[in-house]
Amino acid sequence: MNILVIGNGGREHALIWKIAQSPYVERIFCAPGNGGIAELATCVQIDVTDLKGLTQFAVREKIDLTVAGPELPLTLGVVDAFRREGLVVFGPRRDAAILEGSKTFTKDFLAKYNIPSAAYRNFDDPEEAVRYIHDTPPPYVLKADGLAAGKGVIICRNRNEAFQGIDDIMKTRKFGEAGKRLVIEEFMTGEEASILAVTDGERFVTLPPAQDHKAVFEGDKGPNTGGMGAYAPAPVVDERLLEQIKTTIIQPTIDGMKAEDRLYQGVLYAGLMITAEGPKVVEFNCRFGDPEIQAILPLMKTDIVDLMMEVADGKLKPLEPEISHDSCICVVMASGGYPGSYQKDKVILGLEDVRDQDVMVFHAGTKRSGDQTVTSGGRVLGVTATGRTFLQAREKAYQAVGKITFDGAYYRRDIGHRALKLRSEG
Ligand code: AMP
Ligand code: GLY
């Protein structure tokens, strides 16, 4: 088979690393790819939003399966465009990807189908949002309706912060058109977890529960990023809780989308808050989580091409994927300054010194420059390790991180701190 992966991050590198292990695969292409992906796939310079360029390429190269990594092409309708050309593609169509593309849609959907989530109100008018804040006690969670690269959520402890947030999102349009509409929701407390379900629109299977670390600084301080590290399985979601999540959240969502005539196929990523009243939806994403998937795929024994083909054909086998009993952790190395401004083109040294067979260095923001690999983005590498125990995996990952350097490299030293705490308490 010829496979095309759309995207250029650590998620896409991990997917291609896994796809390359499938005996079905002959050639792998990535549009546009990065410095690490170039070692496993042919990178083609087509932008992820260039739907015409992507479909033309897939027709010309006789691509048998396309996987769209990021949310942007999915919400633009890349799956619809590919299907119109008779091409096989893994991911939700445009009217289903709205679960990530519009938070106001999703909140109304969750309410309609009685799926647990934070209490909320949607607004198109900033003055109305301001009046609501006057009438409601803090804290508040403000969310721009549309895509904002994981940065469109503002947590406000008091009214003044909320007024400022409404101004930033709806008037100054800090997140562009994404801020045309606004959700204000109740602040939930608890531990977060990411559940990735793979679905053909009716049946689904789940991947090992993962936990991301969104804040840039240790102790979960500072602004949110795309994710500074992840690990799986996350002990916060035990077997019983996973069953509850499946029956109260995942299945009703898939069924509800079908009932709305928005058949949802691909990955349904449920970002959850495990509250005292049980698991509640924080957000949905219409794609594999990044960095979560970097910490999930090394545990997966099942052939991912098989799984994705079943979904694309709408015939998912009701067999849970085969998962190893190991633990996996991914530590993100980022450019100093991220998620604010940062410098690029820093030479990355030490990549060849990481030789442990249990360690994978997935590239996110890198590119080749002559015979060197240099930084080209905020999140640069996902240093990922597996181990028989969580502690072993963690030690190996940080050992590898210690061997890699680039000017201004920054990483959190506390990835997995909740799992560590749980262990010391348990
Ligand atoms: P989102 O982009 O919707 O996942 O939100 C980004 C982050 O903001 C989440 O990972 C949570 O840490 C936090 N967050 C979002 N909504 C809420 C909420 N209702 N209560 C508490 N924290 C939230
Ligand atoms: N790691 C969070 C996300 O993929 O949105």
Image: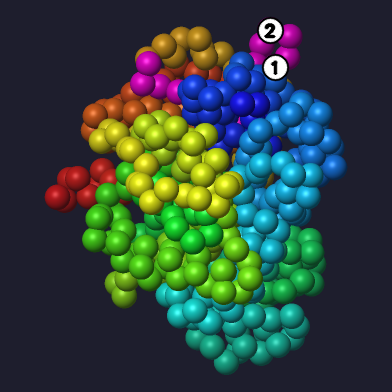
Q: Is residue 231 above or below residue 268?
A: above
Query: What amino acid is at disc 1?
Result: Arg
What scheme was used to colour the molecule? rainbow
What predominant SS class does the magenta segment belong to? strand
Where in the figure is residue 416, as x and y percent of width and height?
34, 42
Q: Would you call the spot at circle 1 few (<14 residues within 10 Å), some (14-19), or many (20 or more)?
A: some
Q: Would you call the spot at circle 2 few (<14 residues within 10 Å), some (14-19), or many (20 or more)?
A: few
Which residue does the image show at 53% across and 25% down from the upper left? 24
In the rendered structure, are the residues bearing label 2 and label 1 in contact, judged by CB atoms less than 8 Å apart? Answer: yes
Query: What amino acid is at disc 2?
Result: Asp
The residue under label 1 is 368
Which residue does the image show at 49% across and 54% down from the upper left? 199
* Res. 313 in view: yes
Q: Per the image, is 369 magenta? A: yes
> Is the residue at mark 1 in contact range of ligand 2, meaning its CB lies under 8 Å from it?
no
Where in the figure is residue 241, as x and y percent of width and height?
28, 61
For label 1, the SS is: strand
How many marks can you see? 2
Q: Is residue 254 above or below residue 105?
A: above
What's the magenta region? 357-373
Nearer-the-camera pick, 407 or 309: 309
Which residue does the image show at 53% across and 59% down from the upper left? 201
- Determine whether, in the image, residue 225 is placed left or right of residue 116: right
The residue under label 2 is 371
Label ID, residue 122:
none
The image quarter containing residue 203 is: bottom left
Which residue does the image show at 53% across and 28% down from the upper left? 19
Q: Is residue 370 above or below residue 5?
A: above
Between marks 2 and 1, how big is the CA–CA gap? 7 Å
- Determine whether, in the image, residue 204 is placed left or right of residue 180: left
Where in the figure is residue 151, as x and y percent of width and height?
63, 56
The image quarter containing residue 297 is: top left
